[in-house]
């Protein structure tokens, strides 16, 4: 099968590069997954919408995709710099549950959220299932690259070629971490293994040559990517914060283990942050938005996917409720156009009238996943006049296979804003709207106004004359 050319931005070289698969016709992608000690916030979910869009684009471009999004269920400390508690253990202690239960619970919530965002299912290996391989990896690199402290086995970053070239700011960053663990040779050195201190009780610990303990966070991704995708593999992704510490450390471990100067992946890609007015959305503040909050306020999860697709993944994106509302409206417009098309694709999808939109779409996605422009190409298709509607459906479905907005199954009703706290059920609202229509038709404006006011008192705003045909929405 022939493949389409794609240009992707490689953080290692800070430039656009032509995607060249290592294995003919295949694309192997590793995405750093969540630490499952808490809910993922919508900022985290942006990282997975980006990874999914990349995966979908690679499939569309003709590659057979192997994609891994790991589950960090051990090892991630409250500070990225090897200090503080294990996030899992801490969450378990404060919830009075076992760390294992906490991990399983939040993994399930995460996977449910992925499904709601129409992120395609991929492999989700758990770090705790790979501890043996992590220990073996540590043993393999110990002699040349590591040293021991009471607190564990540490990686000496001065032993590898150009440590931190991905971050390009190692010195300042490293200095910021200097006080963290006594005895480290270099500020940026990090733990491969964290030995349980005497007298401390950990729920998640394993025997190792360095004492009972738990693996460091960075080793997980090196090991799982190598086991499941082989080294080198094609593309490694994560949020932009990982460009500074976590990924440079993965690269250092890969270099040590593979006895190579190479990083372990050909292309490293990073999505920028979702921010709100206070700055980067982050879990440490404890005050963050999760997907369920959006749903509770009445927004369909795919409105959030639309919001993300409207921005380039390398740009910061500000979350506002107004922005989410606008994204929902745009999605609804697409769904309404799709509903007018016949159910079955057909006709001449190669029709010259559709060619400019198809070309625009292909060029946009091949240009480092420019989803913002690709969306406008999709809108061009739907607004093309005097052309077989079956052909439009075929092209729309091809494009939506990449964008993942579920245009083939969503209906206008699915996109109604209906918060969980609504006092009325939808059928009652519809009945009131009908009664009001009848009152209006009978010129009984007193009744019609009274109905409008009584609905407003219950939080339902009637949308007379809305161009998209929305009858009502809820004040949220
Ligand atoms: P964590 O569970 O903290 O390891 O984060 C999961 C993923 O979300 C990582 O790829 C992070 O880089 C990414 N991430 C964290 N905060 C944000 C944010 N505000 N916007 C976008 N991505 C984020
Ligand atoms: Zn990782």
Image (spheres, rainbow, N blue to C red):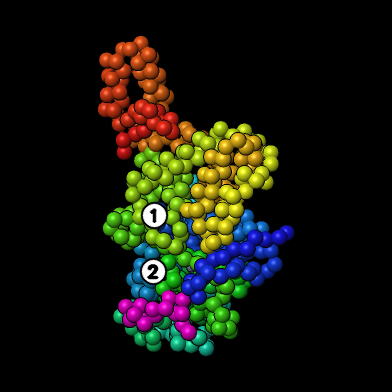
Q: For the C terminus, which image quadrant?
A: top left
Magenta segment? 162-176
Residues packed near mark 1 inside 10 Å, few (<14), some (14 to 19) or many (20 plus)? many
Q: Any mark on residue 123, and which?
A: none
Q: Is residue 119 visible?
A: no
User: Left or right: 457 with respect to 157?
Assistant: left
Distance Cα–Cα, label 1 vs label 2: 18 Å
Determine if residue 371 is in view: yes
Place of residue 334 in the rendered image (x, y in percent of width and height, measured from the top left): 50, 40
Q: Quadrant of residue 177?
A: bottom left
Q: Is label 2 within 8 A of ligand 1 (CB to nearest ligand atom)?
A: no
Q: Give the residue at x 45% y 58%.
A: 312
The verdict on label 1 being within 8 Å of ligand 1 is: yes
Q: Where 348 falls versus 185 (above or below)?
A: above
Q: According to the image, label 1 marks what residue?
A: 41
Which quadrant of the view contains residue 296?
top left
**In the visual, does 388 lie left or right of 467?**
right
255 sits to left or right of 448: right
Q: Is residue 460 above or below residue 56?
A: above
Where residue 472 appears, as percent x and y from the top left, is 37, 30
| Closer-to-camera residue (293/166) | 166
What residue do we see at 31% from left, 35% from top?
A: 475
- Between residue 456 and residue 101, name the one nearer to us: 456
Which mark is drawn over residue 77? 2
């Amino acid at each position: 099968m022939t493949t389409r050319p794609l240009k992707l931005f490689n953080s290692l070289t800070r430039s656009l590069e032509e995607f060249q698969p290592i294995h003919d016709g295949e694309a192997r992608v590793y995405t750093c997954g969540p630490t499952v000690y808490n809910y993922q916030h919508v900022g985290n979910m942006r990282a997975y919408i980006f990874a999914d869009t990349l995966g979908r684009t690679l499939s569309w471009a003709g590659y057979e995709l192997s994609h891994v999004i790991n589950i960090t269920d051990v090892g991630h400390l409250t500070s990225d710099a090897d200090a503080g508690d294990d996030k899992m253990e801490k969450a378990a202690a404060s919830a009075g549950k076992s760390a294992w239960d906490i991990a399983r619970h939040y993994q399930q919530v995460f996977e449910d959220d992925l499904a709601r965002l129409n992120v395609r299912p991929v492999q989700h290996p758990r770090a705790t299932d790979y501890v043996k391989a992590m220990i073996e990896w540590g043993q393999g690199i110990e002699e040349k690259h590591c040293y021991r402290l009471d607190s564990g086995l540490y990686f000496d970053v001065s032993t590898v070629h150009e440590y931190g070239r991905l971050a390009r700011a190692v010195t300042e960053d490293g200095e910021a971490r200097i006080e963290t663990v006594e005895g480290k040779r270099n500020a940026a050195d990090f733990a491969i293994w964290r030995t349980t201190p005497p007298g401390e009780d950990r729920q998640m610990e394993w025997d190792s040559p360095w004492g009972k303990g738990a693996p460091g966070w960075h080793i997980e991704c090196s090991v799982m990517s190598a086991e499941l995708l082989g080294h080198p593999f094609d593309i490694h992704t994560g949020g932009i914060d990982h460009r500074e510490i976590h990924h440079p450390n993965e690269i250092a471990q890969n270099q040590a283990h593979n006895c190579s100067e190479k990083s372990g992946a050909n292309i490293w890609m990073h999505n920028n942050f979702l921010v709100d007015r206070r700055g980067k959305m982050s879990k440490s503040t404890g005050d963050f938005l999760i997907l369920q909050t959006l749903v509770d306020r009445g927004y369909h999860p795919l409105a959030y996917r639309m919001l993300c697709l409207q921005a380039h993944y390398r740009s910061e994106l500000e979350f506002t409720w107004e922005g989410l509302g606008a994204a929902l409206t745009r999605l609804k417009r697409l769904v309404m156009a799709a509903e007018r098309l016949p159910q079955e694709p057909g006709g001449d999808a190669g029709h010259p009238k559709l060619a400019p939109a198809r070309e625009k779409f292909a060029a946009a996605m091949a240009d480092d996943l420019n989803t913002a422009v690709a969306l406008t190409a999709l809108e061009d298709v739907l607004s093309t006049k005097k052309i077989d509607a079956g052909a439009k459906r075929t092209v729309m479905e091809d494009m939506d296979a990449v964008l993942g907005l579920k245009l083939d199954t969503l209906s206008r009703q699915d996109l109604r804003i209906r918060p969980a706290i609504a006092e009325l059920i939808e059928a009652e609202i519809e009945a009131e709207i009908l009664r009001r229509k009848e009152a209006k038709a009978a010129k009984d404006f007193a009744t019609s106004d009274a109905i409008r006011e009584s609905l407003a008192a219950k939080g339902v705003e009637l949308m007379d004359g809305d161009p998209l045909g929305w009858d009502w929405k809820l004040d949220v």
